[in-house]
Image: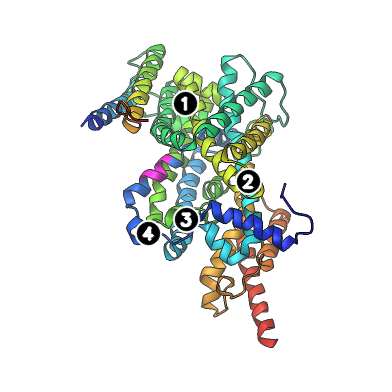
Amino acid sequence: MVDAHPGESRAGQISTIASRLDKLYEFDREPVSGDKLQSGAKFAGLFAGEHVAATEFVIGAFFVLHGVTARDLFLGLLLGNLLAVLSWTFVCAPIAVRTRLTLYWYLRKIGGPGLMIIYNIANALLYCILAGAMIAVSATAIGLAFGIKSPALSDVLPDSIGWILITIALGAAFTLLAVLGFEKLSKFAEVCSPWIFIIFIAGALAMLPRLGVRPDFANFWEVATTRIWNGIAAPGQEKFGFWHILFFAWFCNLAMHIGLSDMAIFRYAKKWTYGFYTAFGMYPGHMLAWICSGIMVAAVGREMNPGLMAYQSLGLAGVSGLVLAGWTTANPTLYRAGLALQAITPNWPRWKITLAAGSATTVISCFPLVFMKLLDYVAIYGLVLMPIGAIVFAEHWILPKLKIETSRAGKNQPLINWAALFVWVGTLITSFLLPIHLYFRWLPGYVIALLSYVLLQVIRRREIREA
Amino acid sequence: MERKILGFLAALSIALCLVFPVLAFLGKMPDEAYKFGFFCASAAWFIFATLRVFPPRPPGRM
């Protein structure tokens, strides 16, 4: 709740909240100076460690259950990840390198503090759901140890007290650890990330003989096309093809590249071409790890149970790996959600906010829907934040080319850039009404956002000139 | 120097984490032995890598 004083105007409230947010992000208010720029190797390492999470166990497995063929999978992942790398390189990195600012400060200049607050709250809610999915994935591993059945593919609500207790216990543990100290835990997460990647490779390798792959690898493709990605969807699952995979791989981090939130990272890049270093995260994490989890789910009889997949392929180490993967990725997500929520929780200390975000996340994690519909959620997550990327792109590149005064150049910055808010909401409504598959909606949505924002700014300029 | 040794031992442990599943895939190691070996190599990785990242504090410091 916003701590509003009686009689305080809405503009006053927005200003108060905005100044709280500004304080939180104060340390990165100024553009990054030349001496703080990082080497390419640092970027490669950062991306390599960032894109292997517990959810990778679910995503690759779902492709198998959605009846993707091996050819569609390999080609789709190859090209989809390439498009993601190019989006980072040609959309996100150039703006970050030119401005040397985070999206927070750049969007604040463009959209005003009001839009920034709305963006932060939306981001916090989306982060909580994502962290909830990570907790749920880890819970399948703990559930296995206590003989508690994992939810079925079609489950929306929790179907047993045992599942609720496990998710609550795990959520509480993750939250408590995040409250106790984020910094040290993030350092420990760095220790975990190479090993978590090895978990995927080792698990898949050990499961291949069970699927009939011979030690000389000669029949791998035959097994892959007939026993793993055989093109047969599980009952109740939609059949996926090449385009679904390509688009999924592309939009999986939509909020980060097209949505520009990775400006926070690329502002430290020496050149915009550092965007190509994202390939070090995409191909091992979003290609190899997904292929490996596909192999593991096929080897356990196509049962969507990450805990079972990890235990059968790697034993106790696999179970620990799944819990650690969930924890190390949920930890920064909880932290970011807390940071975003700090604006609307007046004078709350960090521990209290993390506790609130963690409690909400824990409740969310009880619902199997969050990880059984993870692919759809990832699509919605990117779609919701994508219009902001389009607005910033238009302000940065298109408006100056059309010689239209940009919002950030305005002398009297309004509390909210209403045109931007209108475009954001309008794009979302239009995108959700488009009669195409959810995975493909963001692309026309991006074009709609870009064109409508530019059009509104052209009209605004004409009105100003006429006035 | 100590950091270098710890780094080397950590690298060795993670390499072992890959050797065990390869041996299992080639049929040169039974399933249970592979899982036990992988667990031990993983434990070694966590010990050496954690010590490398969080070196023990010298006595007398808070």
Chain under numbered label 1 = A
> Is A466 placed above or below A85 here?
below
Which label lies toward us, 2 or 1? 2
Badges 4 and 2, same chain: yes
* Residue A437 left/right relative to A280: right
Type of amino acid under label 2: Asn
Q: Give the distance between the C-alpha atoms of the residues marked 3 and 4, in whole angstroms.
A: 23 Å
The residue lying at 75 percent from left, 62 percent from top is: A9
Residue highlighted by disc 2: A347
Q: Which residues are magenta?
A: A45-49
Chain under numbered label 3 = A
Q: Give the distance between the C-alpha atoms of the residues marked 4 and 2, in whole angstroms.
A: 41 Å
Residue highlighted by disc 1: A321
Mark 2 or mark 4, which is nearer the start of the sequence? Answer: 4
Type of amino acid under label 4: Thr
Dot label at residue A28: 3
Mark 1 or mark 3, which is nearer the start of the sequence? Answer: 3
> Disc 1 on helix, strand or loop?
helix
Q: CB under 8 Å between callouts 4 and 2?
A: no
* Residue A21 left/right relative to A101: right
Mark 1 or mark 4, which is nearer the start of the sequence? Answer: 4
> Disc 2 on helix, strand or loop?
loop
Q: Give the distance between the C-alpha atoms of the residues marked 3 and 2, in whole angstroms.
A: 21 Å
The residue lying at 66 percent from left, 55 percent from top is: A118
Type of amino acid under label 1: Gly
- Looking at the picture, tell me which residue is in the foreground, A265 or A411: A411
Dot label at residue A273: 4
Q: Farthest residue toward the left?
A: B1
Q: Quadrant of the C terminus of chain A?
A: bottom right
